Image (cartoon, rainbow, N blue to C red):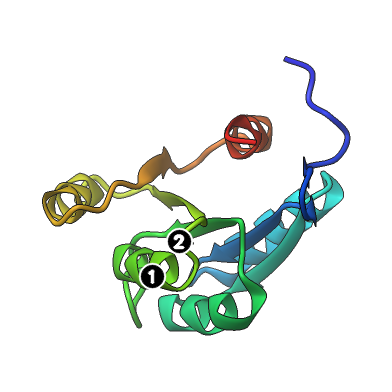
Amino acid sequence: MNLPETAENSQQGKLKVLVADDERAIADTLRIILTQHGFEAEAVYGGRAAIDVARHWTPDIYLGDVVMPDLDGIEAAIQIQAICPACRVMLFSGQAVVRDLLAEARMNGHEFELVVKPIHPTELLERLRAAY
């Protein structure tokens, strides 16, 4: 699959991706990769910080770790979608317990895409661009 050089939303310019992971190296690395591939990206290090940024930045995509100490990624995603209803949510984790958390969220009417860590950057970029 040939990926376009830039990630653009025809109505708003660059797609805005909010990355949240309590592992700073992962969040920062994803921000760099996304920025280098045409996205406008911000990195934060927890669920509460993601909600705070979403209030004023209005991301197109929220890419968040599920397991974070201050506020888990599922609860952050629910609150971000309440603030930004058009925001696409992609949650990622390397932990098997996450499937139970996602099942509980589904029972409460929330459907989120799961990305399993580790993911190759090319696959992540393809998945991010798939909806646009």
* x 36%, y 65%: residue: 73
Q: What is the secondary structure assignment of the residue under circle 2?
A: loop
Which residue bears the numbered disc 1?
82
Q: Which mark is residue 85?
A: 2
Query: Image check: 120 left or right of 91?
Result: right
Where residue 132 appears, as percent x and y from the top left, is: 65, 36
- Measuring 37% from the left and 47% from the top, which residue is drawn there? 94
- Classify 44 as above or below 3: below
Of the pair 60 and 123, the residue shown nearer to us:
60
Q: Residues within 10 Å of mark 2 (few under 14, many from 20)?
A: few
Q: Quadrant of the N terminus?
A: top right
Seen at 33% across and 78% down, the residue is: 71
Q: Give the side of residue 27 with respect to residue 23, left or right.
A: right
Q: Where does the image place residue 51, in percent across and percent down from the top left? A: 47, 78
* Residue pictured at 61% horizontal, 40% vertical: 128
* Residue found farthest to the right: 5
Question: What amino acid is found at the position of numbered circle 1 in the picture?
Answer: Ala
Pinpoint residue 58: horizontal percent, then vertical percent: 61, 70
Question: In the rendering, at what x and y percent does residue 57 appear?
Answer: 66, 75
Contact flag, marks 2 and 1 (Cβ < 8 Å) = yes
Which residue lies most toward the top here?
1
Is residue 52 placed above or below 127 in the rendered structure? below
**Amino acid found under the numbered disc labelled 2:** Pro
Q: Measure the alpha-carbon separation of dots 2 and 1.
A: 6 Å
In the picture, measured across the screen, residue 118 lies left or right of residue 26, that is left
Looking at the image, is 15 positioned above or below residue 73? Answer: above
Q: Secondary structure at mark 1?
A: helix
How packed is label 1: few (under 14 Cα within 10 Å), some, or many (20 or more)?
Answer: few
